[in-house]
Amino acid sequence: MHAVEPYFHWRNLYISSGDDASPFYKKEYSEFFFENKIYNHLIHPQWDSIDSPTLFLKIIYVDYESSFAIIEFMGEWNDAIENDIMTLKRDIIDELIKMGITKYILIGENILNFHSSDDCYYEEWMEDTEEGWVTMINLHPHVEVEMEEVGIDHYFLMGGQLDDIDWRTYLPHQLFDYVETIVEERLGV
């Protein structure tokens, strides 16, 4: 797991630690010291902690003018024990919402498992972004099933064309445009 690092080819376009509106503004990263871990496995030091022992993320792109963010995840999303959605919502998403972000592309190919609890923070997220949407792309099939079984797909758009997007071949705005087209088709906009 230590070799899996957040996507870095858009760093010439956006760096969360250099964005004064980012929750990770001025964060310093080590290239050599691996301190964070998921269970017994060290993870790459470029991942950002949300104070969960099992879920890490990286805000890889934000466009305040177009009101969207692209966030990559790593680890186990555990609402049952760690209440990861509450921490994510309060510490990261609420800060982005304050800056006008209403559309989210969440990259889930490195989410290993999902453990549910109640859905109140998902519902709150949707209420806070009435003019927007949240998508989960490239989830592992078992993670998608775990989320669908508890109704997370009522809040996040997932599945279908969103399951297999070769997102690394796009620039951020191209990815956003592609995902937005899928969202508009689904929502009948």
Image: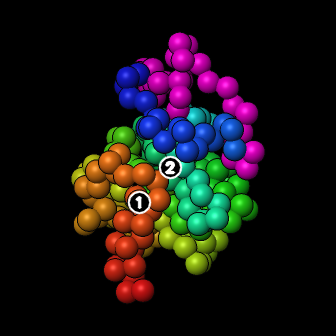
Residue at 58 percent of width and 53 percent of height: 62
The residue that mark 1 highlights is 174
Q: Is residue 151 visible?
A: no
Where is residue 162 drawn, in percent x and y?
A: 31, 62
Q: Residue at x 48, y 42 (%)?
A: 10
In the rendered image, the residue lying farthest to the bottom is 188
Magenta: main secondary structure: loop
Label 2 belongs to which residue? 71
Residue toward you, 128 or 104: 104
> In the depicted view, which residue is nearer to us: 85 or 61?
61
Residue 152 location (% of width, % of height): 42, 65
Front of the two marks 2 and 1: 1
Classed neighbour count for the residue bearing mark 1: other residues with Cα under 10 Å, few (<14), some (14–19), many (≥20): few
Decide: is 82 above or below 49: below
Quadrant containing the N terminus in the rendered view: top left
Give the SS element for disc 2. strand
* N-terminal label among 2 and 1: 2
At 58% across and 78% down in the image, what residue appears? Answer: 131
Is-magenta flag for residue 121? Answer: no
Q: Could you give the CA–CA distance between mark 2 and mark 1, rounded to whole angstroms?
A: 15 Å
Q: Is residue 36 magenta?
A: yes
Q: Quadrant of residue 20?
A: top right
Write the residue at 64% across / 50% down: 92
Q: Are marks 2 and 1 in contact (CB under 8 Å)?
A: no
Q: Quadrant of the C terminus?
A: bottom left
Residue reaching furthest to the top: 32
Looking at the image, residue 15 sits to the left or right of residue 18; the answer is left
For this view, does 182 lie left or right of residue 91?
left
Seen from the viewer's position, the closer of residues 178 and 25 is 178
Q: Which residues are magenta?
A: 20-47
Where's residue 186, x and y in %? 34, 79
Q: Amino acid at mark 2?
A: Ile
